[in-house]
């Protein structure tokens, strides 16, 4: 029988300044797909179910701690950034001797759980390094191997000679090692190098000197090990991540008109035969059922869209529920609490907030519907407004089934329009309107006979 795997503890290095971001914000708080870099790393770390997660923080550290106040992590202050070896030294006091330590970097956000599991499984007798083949010029540390292909040491780019710089296999910065070993090696690190720092990477040569094997693993995708050092890096990684998400959605049956013009900042769940045009943005948690079509330039956040609904271009949907077969937009705005029952229609320049819109009801043009309950089969004319706010409090408007609200009417809440009622166009309704009757409030139309429109005096120079 195999011995059980030793417990895992994760150390995330996040004390660096990130000077090349040219930002007041600590680097790990910059966002990828709408979430801080560190949040991505913490998610992956938690997915490995470690005994503990230790985050080494330094520069701007209080802001990092505040941003993650609810995370179950052990915060370790590295007051002065004296290198990655020093950062691990700071955390080491809080780690147990029987654990394997997995060192992650706070600015390498897309590392995957599978890759880390492989790496961890290889760090039993000695350290295991996550390395990869670099395809373009870069300044990563170089992996030096002997004639038998065994790892001998890591040379940092700034300390490397020309032959070493030409090596293609490089260090991702992620490694796993038994804690007991790190406790031996870390105090022996020296800062006699080009950067005058304690390099964590130097533990590899120490392991080799102790006669321990050094294992390696490589990531499934290159984006997993790409770090964020500049804003250009961040933008490139954002695109790589978005294209990965797009590919996964297409594999599950969604059609994206252009996976390069598509962004999800959160969780998007799509059914089959969902069709999404260019430049749509999804935030928070969005669920889209089968056969939904979404036009270009829509922004949808924390909402659910039921089967067969059609969202026309330039529509904003936030905190809403769209029923089956509804048509929304173009240029519509659904705000939190908007609930559309099946086959409702919300057209251009219509804003709906905190309102239930019954089945088959139409609000086609230029309306504000706030804090309302509207029945089925209602027709809301162009320009109708629910006046829900009296300057101090909000009030509700209730409209019964099959009512017809004439164009450009104002419904001053609290007010109730009965089922089948008709409101004459241009009315200001301040009292309840009875079911089945015509109610209107406008001055009677009159004709002033003989009235003359003023005319301009004739100009002498003309004619
Ligand atoms: C490091 C590796 C290099 C590897 C590269 C991959 C070392 C010596 N070198 O180099 O081999 O190819 O990562 O990206 O480890 N940090 C601290 N405290 C410190 C210094 C750094 O917490 O005192 C953190 C940083 O916030 C960052 C990470 O450690 O998240 C890496 O530090 P960085 O200075 O970027 O290391 P590199 O020079 O890129
Ligand atoms: Ca780096």
Image: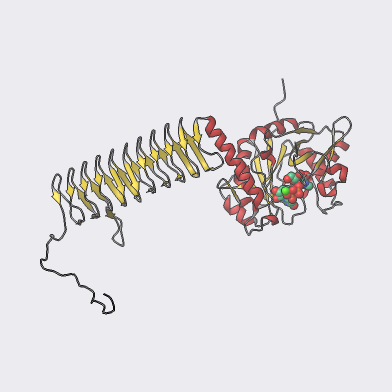
| On screen, residue 82 above or below 46 | below
Q: Quadrant of the N terminus?
A: top right
Q: Is residue 389 above or below residue 450?
A: above
Q: Does residue 286 appear anywhere in the picture? A: yes
- For the residue pair 97 and 265, the one nearer the viewer reads as 265
- Residue 185 visible, this angle: no
Q: In the figure, is residue 74 to the left or right of 354?
A: right
Q: Residue sitting at 89 percent across and 31 percent down? A: 147
User: Residue 198: percent from the left, percent from the top?
Assistant: 81, 50
Asked which colour scheme the image uses, the reply is: secondary structure
Q: Is residue 128 left or right of residue 429?
A: right
Name the residue rendered at 84%, 47% in the picture: 189
Give the x, y percent position of residue 223: 66, 40
Q: Residue furthest front?
A: 463
Q: How many marks?
A: 0
The residue positioned farthest toward the left in the image shown = 449
Which residue ends up furthest to the top in the rendered image?
A: 1
Quarter where residue 201 is shown? top right
Q: Is residue 229 left or right of residue 196?
A: left
Q: Residue at 50% across / 42% down in the picture?
A: 278
Measured as percent of width and height from the top left, residue 255 is found at 50, 34
The quadrant of the picture occupied by the C terminus is bottom left
Viewer-side residue, 388 vs 247 = 247
Between 116 and 320, the one lying in front of the other is: 320
Asked if residue 399 lies left or right of residue 169, the reply is left
Q: Position of residue 338 (x, y in %)?
A: 35, 45
Q: Along the line of sight, which residue is nearer the eye, 61 or 34?
A: 34
- Residue 440 figure quarter: bottom left
């Amino acid at each position: 029988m195999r011995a059980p795997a030793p417990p895992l503890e994760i150390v995330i290095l996040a004390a660096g300044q990130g000077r090349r971001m040219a930002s007041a914000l600590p680097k790990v708080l910059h966002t990828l797909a709408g979430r801080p870099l560190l949040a991505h790393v913490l998610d992956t770390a938690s997915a490995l179910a470690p005994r503990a997660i230790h985050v080494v923080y330094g520069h701007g550290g209080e802001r990092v701690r505040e941003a993650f106040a609810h995370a179950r992590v052990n915060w370790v202050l590295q007051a002065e950034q004296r290198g990655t070896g020093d950062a691990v030294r700071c955390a080491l006091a809080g780690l147990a001797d029987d654990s394997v330590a997995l060192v992650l970097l706070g600015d390498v956000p897309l590392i995957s759980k599978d890759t880390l599991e492989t790496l961890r499984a290889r760090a039993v007798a000695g350290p295991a390094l996550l390395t990869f083949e670099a395809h373009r010029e870069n300044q990563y540390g170089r992996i030096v191997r002997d004639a038998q292909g065994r790892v001998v040491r890591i040379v940092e780019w700034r300390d490397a000679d020309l032959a070493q710089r030409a090596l293609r296999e490089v260090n991702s910065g992620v490694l796993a090692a038994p804690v007991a070993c790190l406790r031996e090696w870390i105090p022996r690190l020296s800062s006699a190098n080009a950067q005058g720092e304690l390099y964590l990477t130097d533990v590899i040569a120490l392991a080799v000197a102790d006669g321990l094997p050094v294992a390696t693993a490589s990531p499934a995708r290159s984006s997993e090990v790409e770090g964020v050092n500049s804003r250009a890096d961040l933008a490139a990684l954002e695109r790589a991540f978005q294209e990965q998400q797009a590919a996964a959605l297409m594999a599950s049956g969604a059609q994206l008109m252009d996976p390069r013009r598509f962004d999800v900042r959160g969780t998007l769940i799509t059914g089959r035969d969902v069709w999404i045009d260019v430049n749509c943005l999804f935030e928070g948690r969005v669920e889209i059922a089968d056969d939904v079509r979404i036009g270009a330039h829509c922004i949808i956040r924390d909402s659910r869209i039921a089967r067969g609904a059609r969202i026309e271009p330039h529509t904003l949907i936030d905190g809403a529920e769209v029923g089956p077969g509804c048509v929304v937009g173009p240029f519509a705005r659904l705000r939190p609490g908007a609930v559309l029952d099946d086959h409702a229609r919300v057209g251009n320049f219509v804003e709906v907030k905190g309102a239930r819109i019954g089945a088959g009801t139409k609000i086609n043009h230029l309306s504000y519907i706030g804090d309302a309950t509207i029945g089925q089969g209602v027709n809301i004319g162009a320009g109708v407004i629910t006046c829900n706010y009296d300057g101090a409090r909000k009030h509700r408007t209730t409209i019964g089934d099959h009512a017809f609200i004439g164009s450009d009417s104002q419904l001053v809440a609290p007010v109730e329009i009965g089922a089948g009622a008709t409101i004459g166009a241009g009315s200001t309704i301040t009292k309840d309107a009875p079911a089945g009757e015509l109610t209107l409030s406008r001055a009677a139309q009159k004709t002033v006979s003989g009235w003359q429109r003023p005319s301009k005096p004739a100009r002498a120079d003309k004619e």
